[in-house]
Amino acid sequence: MRAVLLVLASLALPFSAMAADCGADLKGAQKVESARYVLAYRTQPGKIVIGKSFAMDLAICPKGGNPAADGVQVDAQMPEHGHGMNYKAAIKPAGNGRFRADGMMLHMPGHWEFTFDVKGGGKTDKLTNSLVLE
């Protein structure tokens, strides 16, 4: 039992370190996690303006021996309204677990949820993060 606890304790350290370091160079980045990945994102420009196009810089870091991300899809929905964005983001890989999503636009105020479908190792992890746009 003690050996199992020591192994579990040693596995916990890389996860928390990875979460803290992922996207450290993306000043003001938001972070979301799944069982296999940490995703940090920052919008460009920094503040989202209703009806104005924006981009998103993403860093995706695998946790504890999981494969690097092969790709990502980014979208946004308004759960209370039952609809999403009017435009589809164009995603470009930037190397080393980095991606850029261009052409995003939130067309009305309210509660939005960003969804990130991270693909790696033949599986897809869905990560979400909420925001209120006023």
Image: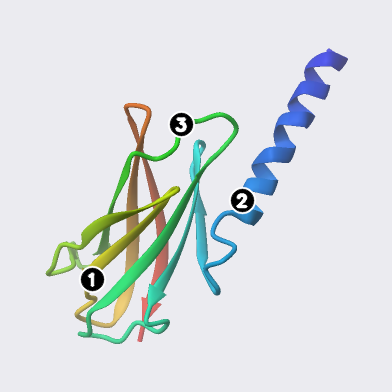
Q: Does label 3 or label 1 sit earlier along the sequence?
A: 3
- Label 2 vs label 1: CA separation? 26 Å
- What residue lies at 77% left-to-right and 22% top-to-bottom? 7
SS at mark 1 in the image: strand
**Dot 2, crowdedness within 10 Å: few (<14), some or many (≥20)?**
many
Classify residue 134 as left or right of residue 1. left
Looking at the rendered structure, the kind of residue marked 2 is Ala
Q: Does label 3 or label 2 sit earlier along the sequence?
A: 2
Vertical placement of residue 120 versus 131, above or below? above
- Label 3 vs label 1: CA separation? 27 Å
Depth check: 113 or 10 in front?
A: 10
Residue highlighted by disc 2: 19
Q: Quadrant of residue 21?
A: bottom right
Looking at the rendered structure, the kind of residue marked 3 is Pro
**Dot 3, crowdedness within 10 Å: few (<14), some or many (≥20)?**
some
SS at mark 2 in the image: helix
Residue 39 is situated, as x and y percent measured from the top left of the image, at 47, 53
Residue highlighted by disc 1: 104
Residue 83 is situated, as x and y percent measured from the top left of the image, at 16, 64
Looking at the rendered structure, the kind of residue marked 1 is Met
Residue highlighted by disc 3: 67
**Dot 1, crowdedness within 10 Å: few (<14), some or many (≥20)?**
many
- What residue lies at 15% left-to-right and 62% top-to-bottom? 88
